[in-house]
Image: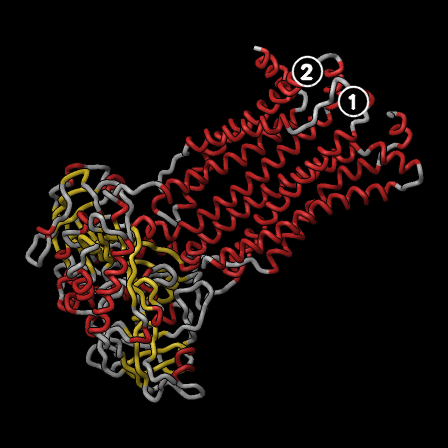
Amino acid sequence: MLFFRDLRIAVRSLALVPALWITVAVTLALGIGANAAIFSVVRAVLLRPLVNRDEDRLLYLRQSAPGIGEANAAFSVPEIQDIGSGLKSIQELGTFSEIDFTVVGLGTPREIPAGVVDGRYFEVMGLRPVLGRLLTPADDGENAAGAVVLTYHFWRTSLHSDPSVLGKTVRLESCCGARSATVVGVLEPSVPYPVATEIIANIVTSPHHLSATMVTGREHRMTEVFARLAPGASIDSARAELQSVYGAMVAAHPEVYRPEEHFKIDVTRMHEQINARANTILWILFAASGLLFVIASSNVANLVLARTVRREPDLAIRSALGASTQVLRRSLLAESIVLCGSGAVAAVALAIPMVAVLGRYAARFSVRAEELALDFSLVWFGIGLALIASVFLAFIPRLPSAKAPRGGLTGRGARVAGGSRGRLRIFAVLQIAASFLLLAGACVLMKTLFVLEQTRPPFDSTNVLALNLPKMSYGRTPQQVDEFYREVQRRVGALPGVEHVSSGFAAPWRDDHLNVSFQFAAQGARRPDGKDFRGKFRVVSPGFFDTFGVPIQEGRDFNDGDKDGSERVVIITESLAKMLYPGQDAVNRKLRWTDGVMKFVGISTEPRRIIAVVPDFDDENIIPSPAMTIYEPSGQEQGWNGRLFVRAHQDPYALVPAISQTIHEMSADQPVEKASTLGDVRAEVLAPDRLNAIVFGGFAVVALLISVVGVAGVLAFSVSWRTREFGIRMALGALPRHILATVLLEGVALAGIGVGTGVVVGFALARLIARFGMDIEQPGPFAFIGSAVVILGAALFASAVPAARAARVDAVEALRSE
């Protein structure tokens, strides 16, 4: 009962200093709330178990070839057959190939991301249906009926959880033809990997997967492989066995696996593979929130300690009147609990919206971040920390002794305050050091974002509209398909406001298959090591370069005469021309594809004449790099490429309704999707970098504000306890500016010690990160110097008010108070 009375007294006492109460509550709310929100994201994305059965036995296989820049290459069917035979540590393999299907029969026809899998895939992945059934080995083989499983997300959002979808027959259009399939089931909610698919179909639905080029092409790699550990086997034994089998396969086919390409295989747990992209960024974010918590706790300690020390005369009077040390401690504890408890409650209110915001942020890096909720177990942990902190804060100050109350009664508490002032300075230095680290990290991200934002693309990205027009071939001959899309370009080009129309291989920056490159040989050009060259592969229509405002430097553009049966021609970029023919003319030289995969993907290896050279057109990277690219005319290769580019006189988006209407008048089933200017595509690509800078910049700003309050509080406390000293100095002739300079220097000194500590810790962390090989940009001198300047400037600003107060001390009044 006595403690409840102390709590009521504490509330009344703190109500007299609302600024202190609000500052402590908000500071703790930021520290605890940010940690609760971020750990909710970390736990959901990185630590939460997968729904897959026996997920610890679920593996992901990958091969790589560093010699040709392949960090994670897919597998070909012959490779899967070779490595899958006779394994003991691995029980079974399941395969997945990424594909885009245009689905007709489930509402408005549209292109959706999909997967083609074998009949063992779902068993290997350990997944179950929520409706109907999943695919089994009975669905394998070229004579099997087409079957489709819907993902739970697609079924719930696009089909509104309609159970009658089971048994529906749909048409699946892909680049190589159309097939019909029946919806047989709905997959349970699970993490889609390696891509966010909406439907998963059996192999027979993709004509290309049944072709001889796919079945026999060892270099035709487009399949991901998953595996399940045998009972009792370890991942190390599986890795050793796979490497042994893979080594034998590589040795058996030296014409495919060249020594200089360094082909190798590895295996990781599925959980680790799924988290690979989000792992680093989320743990760094969690570390940043930890620094913020240190800053917040230090600032609260400063504020509470300063208040307690200022009350030492009052505590001394109570002690002199008979209050025991236990009673005094209990009253301090009551105040600390009210302060920290209110901060913890505010933290819960702050953490709930923060989880929603951070969830949208994390969704850029992991699909597991969708529909996150606050992890209340961590909130309770944070509240517990706040209560522990309140006990800690109640027992930090020294209490006056009833046997020696004179110091407190006469106002000479300097000796008691001296130790408290030292602790206040330590807390302030901790805040500044942590703020410096956060600010340095934010500077690195902001510098990166600034460079990206200021870099201009080598082509016009403002008035060029990119649209996806997936190839539709049902009921048409190949000639009719080509004629249809040529007519699409002609009609769209005739619309008012359209300046140029063309088609291409992929939309710059947006499409995943922009990194396609093949080996080739060029007439009169040889590498010093005698190996073939490697160049990026692009197929474009006549007028492509006009659409993007890219001039032809030498030669001519493609035209309608560049078609099947005519001389095969190519256009190359300036960097490639200089590499092949330094100081010479590249036009009219010949090159030919020599890559072994060409015979499997239907690209001719006949010699091709170079008819033009264009400036480098880097469509992959925001910061352009030398583009070693070879362009082929769409009339001679693969027909329609699925991407339409429209250059407008004014607002490209104003043309979208007319373009869609024109195409739908020609074919109601033809999807017209993802209409976006390249400027907006570029902005979307930059969004993760922008979000990183905003999130970490926000942490740094909040940390800096808290540190400024902390430094100002320390100096204000120092000034209040040195009032007598300043009065004596001024009575002896010291000028106000000298007093002002003294306090300002004290603030800058605190900031300097904090910055120095932060620099040492920052360099140590940078070396540790580099040692573990994390793909993180290291902070350079700019980040450290810029952060130090900001911190010192903020400390100077924070010192201004207490310094001005010290300079206004009246010597007579200060001495009279003694």
Q: For the image shown, how many numbered marks are present on the structure?
A: 2
Q: First in sequence, mark 2 or 1: give its number.
A: 2
Farthest-out residue, left: 143
Q: Given the image, on which type of amino acid does mark 2 rest?
A: Ser
Q: Position of residue 763 (x, y in %)?
A: 58, 56
Q: Position of residue 581 (x, y in %)?
A: 40, 86
Residue in the image at 80% along x and 38% along y:
804
Q: From the viewer's side, name the closer residue of 710 and 498.
A: 710
Q: Which of the labelled discs sits on residue 408, or is there none?
A: 1
Image quadrant assignment for residue 22: top right
Q: Position of residue 427 (x, y in %)?
A: 65, 39
Q: Position of residue 196 (x, y in %)?
A: 29, 50
User: Which quarter of the image is occupied by the C terminus?
Assistant: top right
Say left or right for 771 vs 129. Answer: right
Q: Is residue 182 visible?
A: yes
Say left or right for 558 vs 721. Answer: left
Q: Is residue 479 visible?
A: no
Q: Which of the labelled discs sits on residue 424, or is there none?
A: none
Coloured how?
A: secondary structure
Q: From the viewer's side, name the closer residue of 650 and 817.
A: 817
Residue in the image at 84% along x and 38% along y:
807
Q: Which of the labelled discs sits on residue 324, or is there none?
A: 2
**Alpha-carbon neighbours of circle 1 within 10 Å: few (<14), some, or many (≥20)?**
many
* Residue 314 vertical placement versus 102 (above, below): above
Q: From the viewer's side, name the closer residue of 658 and 501.
A: 501
Residue in the image at 52% along x and 41% along y:
290
**Alpha-carbon neighbours of circle 2 within 10 Å: few (<14), some, or many (≥20)?**
some
User: Helix or strand or loop: what does disc 1 sit on?
Assistant: helix
Image quadrant assignment for residue 509: bottom left
